[in-house]
Amino acid sequence: MEKMTASSAFLSVVCILFVTVLIKLMNWVWLRPKKLEKLLRQQGLSGTSYRFLFGDLKDFAAMRAEALKYPMDSFSHDYFPRVEPYRHQLSPKLGEDFFLWFGPIPMIQISKPQLIREAFTKTQELQKLKVNPIFEKLFPGIVNLEGEKWAKHRKLINPAFHVEKLKLMLPAFRDSCEEIINKWEMIIAKRGSGELDVYPDLMQLSSDVISRAAFGSNYKEGQKIFELLKQQTDVGLLMLQSVYIPGMRFIPTSRNRRFKKLEDQMRTSLRAIINKRKEEIEAGEALKADLLGILMDSNSKEIQQAAGSYKNQHIGMSLEDVIDECKLFYLAGQETTSTLIVWTMILLSKHQDWQERAREEVLQAFGNNVPDIESLNHLKTMTMILYEVLRLYPPVMQFSRWVQKDTNLGALSLPSGTIITFFMNTIHMDKELWGDDAEKFKPERFAEGISKATNGNNSYFPFGWGPRICIGEKFAITEVKMAICMFLQRFSFELSPSYVHAPRTMILLQPQHGAHIILNKL
């Protein structure tokens, strides 16, 4: 009788657990999405109808894959239909602001600058997207932190990006640029000109810069980490294209095992670099003026100042925190600058008049000497050109935020558990905000600064906006200015007939088929 009672109790517990899981599952994949859909439509928002589990993901992936098979018909800056064909198809039917489905989660697209500015400032209610834990592994550190921990990391990292620290990193920028220039000069030495795809070399350039500026090593020593990063990013992007079911990352599939192996190898390499630096510091060696050295110094001072405090367990970064920030340095420092440099070269190749104006300014400021940071900051024509390139080809084209708790955004009531998203290039090329020439390359629009160019609308967000604006903006702009200046001193360049205009987004906005450019030695 007791055995029967025990068996019945166990069976009852199993049944209760099964029913509970089933109810939660049904709520996740159907009941809650339908409830959210009703709430959004009651506010007057148009959107697609929810489809079980996958939402719009299958249509989105299929249309994007088809669009990327073909380059653009002409050299046009209206590339949104190619990189976001599904959204482009929906917009005429649903309006500028609408919602679609990221699996069982509604994603609300907003387009008005005032709403976007408000979204950037509501850091408590609207937080970084955390739909899939893989994203946090790909982009760890400050970019994904929230609240007090974000504030702490931002405070500790911020000194590394001050102008006086960037001055110390300028030799790293110069040496990396010299290596690429010497390589190009050897390629075109016989004829004085030649065609090559500059994009792989520009990726190597930015990899070299971040290795030297961040870790004091050269590209070859950092190449292992970059290769691991590239492989992990490729695997991670495939994983992000499917609906994430909680717990799936722990299932030992071949893709999950591959991702974890790459993560472990990368962290081991970064841990070795950091431990070596700690040993050097403990041995009394002078602090190196690179990002890692500055970060470790800032972290050490923070811990010392808090010594004895009852709060000191919450002060400073752990070794794993430092590894996360180093990984982010590598990824963000390499990808952002290489894409900005390549689009700048492509547009200056297309617009020879602006290339000549930029070269005249560079030669007048530096001659054939290496640029210095003070003069770099006063290059007016160069700054106008970079602002315009960032307007037309922002490295990060899409920003998304997770609605952490019910909140208002303008007249919208956003329920928790939804996502809001906005696209930089659609705002940057809105004719109502920028004028009828919004889709044209016209650096002169920035002749009197950003505020004048936007008619006071604050509709320019290439590095984000508000308290979480990109901390590495000055680093990236300084590196890009240095590279373009040194290229203009040595070469003139033009688009090759074999250049294929095909922007695509792979985390950042990149030229899908490279950048085939004809270099002419000056």
Image (spheres, rainbow, N blue to C red):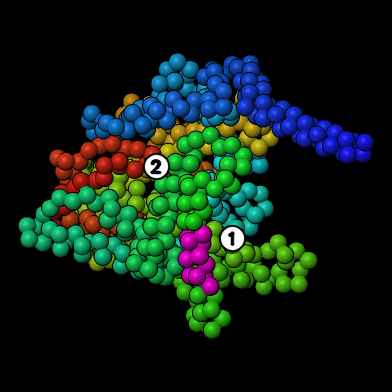
- Which x, y percent locates residue 446? 36, 41
Residue drawn where x is 47% and y is 60% of the image: 266
Q: Secondary structure at mark 1?
A: helix
Q: Is residue 97 visible to us here? A: yes
Nearer to the camera, 436 or 214: 214
Q: Report the predominant secondary structure element of the magenta stretch.
A: helix
- Which x, y percent locates residue 29? 62, 27
Q: Amino acid at mark 2?
A: Met
Q: Is residue 253 left or right of residue 36?
A: left
Rendered position, 125 above or below 45: below
Q: Which of the 4 quarters of the picture holds residue 514?
A: top left
State the residue lying farthest toward the right: 1
State the residue lying farthest toward the bottom: 283
Q: Residues within 10 Å of mark 1 (few under 14, many from 20)?
A: some
Q: Residues within 10 Å of mark 2 (few under 14, many from 20)?
A: some
Assess whether residue 269 is covered by the magenta stretch. yes
The label on residue 321 is 1
| Residue carrying label 2 | 506
- Which x, y percent locates residue 504? 35, 38
Q: Which of the 4 quarters of the picture holds residue 305?
A: bottom right
Q: Amino acid at mark 1?
A: Asp
- Which x, y percent locates residue 168? 42, 69
Report the span colored magenta: 264-275
